[in-house]
Image (spheres, grey):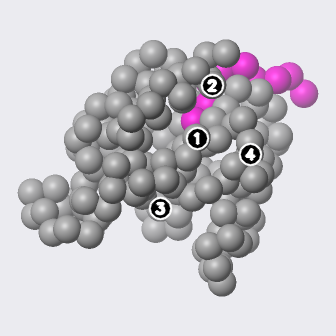
Amino acid sequence: MTLDTRHYIFLDIDGVLATDNERYYLNVKKYDQELNVYGFDKKCVKVFNEICAKINPIIILSSDWQHHFTIKQINDFFERQGITHKISDVTGTAYGDKFTNLSQLEECRAYDIVQYAKKHGIKKYLAIDDLNLSHWLDDYFIHTPRANEGIKQSGIKDKILSKLLK
């Protein structure tokens, strides 16, 4: 198998692009009627677009959104939200979408990402998630622990670029 050396981002949505400010506080202007979800934080979109402009990544959706929407629906939503890059694929979920606790969800999400990377011979990748996947992904992971800030948290963009460009 030939190793793929392009840059890949395994992307979660909630807590990364869709912050708690959009999801839990009614903001009718940001509500998307088509998908029945709240829009993304504009500052998170700006940061994500800056990252994408710099490294032109292939984006693989690792979010639970893959259980509810098609790639086309998500890409259309991304476009409406101002995201410049499209989702190329989804990780799939070896264990479905039923979990008994957060730790199990984190472990399964990390497992799905690692399996996807191995199956496709991906060498340069980074998972971005508000779940803590560091125990399983170590250097291949950036945590956005403050769900009300997501990817716009101070220093996150630089960490992402640093890890992908090394």
The residue wearing badge 2 is: 163
Q: Residue furthest left?
A: 29
Name the disc covering residue 137, or none.
4
Is residue 33 rendered to the left or right of residue 53?
A: left
Circle 2 SS class: helix
The residue wearing badge 3 is: 65
**Residue at (48% x, 24% y) in the render:** 158
The secondary structure making up most of the magenta span is strand
Magenta stretch containing residue 20, yes or no?
A: no
Residue 1 location, quadrant: top right
Q: Which is more foreground, mark 4 or mark 3?
A: 4
The residue wearing badge 1 is: 142
From which residue to which does the magenta span run?
Answer: 1-9
**Residue at (62% x, 73% y) in the render:** 102
In the image, residue 59 sits, relative to residue 112, either above or below, namely above
Circle 1 SS class: strand
Is residue 89 among the parts visible in the rendering? no
Residue 101 location, quadrant: bottom right
In the image, residue 26 sits, relative to residue 50, either above or below, namely below
Name the disc covering residue 21, or none.
none
Circle 3 SS class: helix
Looking at numbered disc 1 in the image, what kind of residue is underneath it?
Answer: Ile
Q: CA distance from mark 4 to mark 1?
A: 9 Å
Q: Residues within 10 Å of mark 3 (few under 14, many from 20)?
A: some
Disc count in the image? 4
Q: Residue furthest front?
A: 154
**Residue at (38% x, 40% y) in the render:** 153
Nearest the viewer among 129 and 70 is 129
Q: Residue furthest bottom?
A: 100
Is residue 126 among the parts visible in the rendering? yes
